[in-house]
Image (tube, helix red, strand yellow):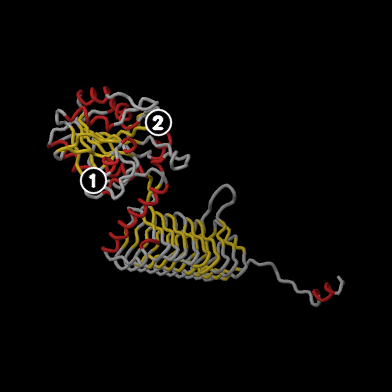
């Protein structure tokens, strides 16, 4: 492997400033954990190993079961330098990156630029800097003749030093050589817990010219998350980037601030995303669709010309020119065919609705196969569960299911058959037959009048 690389990701944040029991790096940004964003960017560099450092880490391990990660328990979180020292036994490549797990928007090109900068100059330590409009509490980067000479923490800086806008981003590139470890271990611990800040590497390496910094021109890329205010701010930044990308590709978004999108979402040409639309996970929307207002789609595939409004779709597939909503719920395994209609308060789960099926309102269709052009009346229920097992219902092409019918599975309704309103169907219905399962109606003349008069 040319220029082998390891990546160390710092994941020690316990969510204290987030006011949360959830580790900071697991808080979602655009539908994905903060750490997932960092892992994706790190993976584009094809590292030999990704090491995640933090105290404990069981929750983080469970959140990423399919990723090839090496977890290192840092014990007490003793600054970035302490985390790097804890990760040392796991490192095998000559160069490694140190990435904060709460800086989710850093692009691959920024990391590659830092790597190139580090390698071309033969440095032991290098880091990315930024110049945000408000440097806040970030450590100020002091330069002499263009080269870094030290980093001053904001709390110990003079007014003149606080006027410096260039600050440390916390993203470092280090060489895995004995000299680096000697310097890091030799830095006097600071704070009550004996912390080892990475920034303390700078001054010991300045005299030999083995440390320097690269100023990244887009501060937004390097912003971190300290609390929920920062999280919301970065949500806005990422959302703007996603919506801009889609609009430039031919998607209409009348109010970009009122839609919420995962980075993995794909949307086709001439589709409109109305306010209140949420597209999460691996959702894919075809061309010429109308999604929203008030639509929530997760891991759902929608083909061309579909309209979805005021509805929830989870793990579903909707084919060309179908209509979903308002107030419909497609649960995992729902498949809606071309030009089908799923309307008000209809729930579909693990069921396939063929082309042109109409289920206009107030129905539950679960574990079923509904043939093309069938009509599902209001109040229809496929009774698919007996408390132990699930059973399937088959409804043939062109069948008509009357209102308030209960189809007790397993049961088959033949092609073109009719089921009368209010029927409970427990046996198969042959094609083109009429099935009635009602109690016989009884009428007692004058009964109501006598009751009101106190009679019997």
Q: Does the image show residue 242?
A: yes
Outermost residue, left side: 120
Residue at (15%, 36%) from the top-left corner? Answer: 119
**Label 2 belongs to which residue?**
55
Nearer to the camera, 429 or 394: 394
Quarter that holds the C terminus = bottom right
- Residue 1 in view of the camera: no
Task: Give residue 98's position: percent from left, percent from top.
Answer: 27, 35
Please give the name of the residue rendered at 42% of the width and 60% of the height, measured from the top-left corner.
335
**How many numbered marks, from 0 up?**
2
* Residue 9 place in picture, x, y as percent: 31, 36
Q: Quadrant of residue 270?
A: bottom left
Drawn side of residue 432 relative to residue 38, left or right: right
**How many residues crowd mark 1 within 10 Å: few (<14), some (14–19), many (20+)?**
some
Q: Which mark is residue 108?
A: 1
SS at badge 1? helix
Would residue 451 be found to the left or right of residue 134 on screen?
right
User: Of callouts 2 and 1, which one flags the residue occurring earlier in the amino acid sequence?
Assistant: 2
Residue drawn at (19%, 41%), measured in percent from left and top? 214
């Amino acid at each position: 492997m040319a220029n082998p690389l390891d990546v160390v990701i710092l994941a020690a944040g316990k969510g204290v400033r987030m006011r949360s029991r959830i580790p900071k790096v697991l808080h979602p940004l655009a539908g994905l954990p903060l750490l997932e964003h960092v892992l994706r960017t790190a993976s584009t560099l094809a590292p030999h190993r990704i090491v995640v450092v933090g105290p404990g880490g069981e929750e983080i391990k469970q959140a990423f079961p399919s990723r090839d990660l090496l977890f290192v328990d840092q014990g007490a979180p003793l600054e970035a330098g302490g985390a790097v020292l804890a990760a040392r036994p796991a490192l095998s490549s000559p160069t490694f990156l140190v990435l904060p797990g709460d800086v989710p928007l850093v692009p691959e090109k920024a990391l590659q630029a830092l790597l190139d900068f580090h390698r071309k100059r033969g440095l032991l330590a290098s880091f990315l800097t930024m110049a945000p409009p408000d440097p806040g509490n970030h450590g100020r980067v002091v330069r002499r003749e263009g080269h870094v000479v030290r980093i001053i923490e904001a709390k110990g800086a003079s007014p003149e030093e606080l006027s410096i806008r260039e600050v440390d981003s916390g993203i470092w590139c280090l060489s895995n050589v004995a000299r680096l470890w000697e310097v890091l271990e030799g830095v006097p611990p600071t704070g009550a817990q004996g912390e080892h800040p990475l920034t303390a590497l700078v001054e010991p390496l300045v005299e030999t010219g083995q440390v320097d910094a690269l100023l990244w021109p887009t501060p937004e890329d390097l912003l971190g998350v300290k609390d929920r205010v920062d999280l919301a701010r970065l949500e806005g930044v990422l959302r703007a980037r996603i919506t801009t990308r889609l609009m430039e590709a031919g998607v209409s978004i009348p109010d970009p601030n009122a839609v919420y999108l995962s980075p993995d979402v794909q949307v086709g040409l001439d589709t409109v995303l109305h306010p209140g639309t949420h597209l999460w996970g691996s959702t894919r929307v075809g061309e010429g669709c109308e999604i929203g207002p008030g639509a929530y789609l997760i891991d759902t595939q929608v083909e061309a010309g579909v309209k979805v409004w005021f509805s929830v779709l989870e793990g579903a597939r909707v084919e060309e020119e179908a209509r979903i909503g308002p107030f419909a719920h497609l649960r995992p395994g729902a498949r809606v065919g071309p030009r089908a209609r799923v309307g008000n308060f209809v729930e579909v789960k693990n069921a396939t609705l063929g082309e042109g099926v109409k289920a206009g309102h107030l129905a539950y269709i679960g574990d079923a196969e509904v043939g093309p052009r069938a009509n599902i009346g209001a109040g229809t229920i496929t009774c698919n569960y007996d408390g132990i097992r699930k059973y399937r219902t088959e409804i043939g092409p062109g069948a008509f299911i009357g209102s308030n019918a209960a189809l007790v599975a397993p049961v088959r309704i033949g092609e073109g058959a009719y089921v009368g309103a209010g029927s409970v169907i427990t046996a198969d219905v042959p094609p083109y037959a009429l099935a009635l399962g009602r109690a016989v109606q009884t009428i007692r003349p004058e009964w109501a009048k006598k009751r009101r008069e106190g009679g019997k």
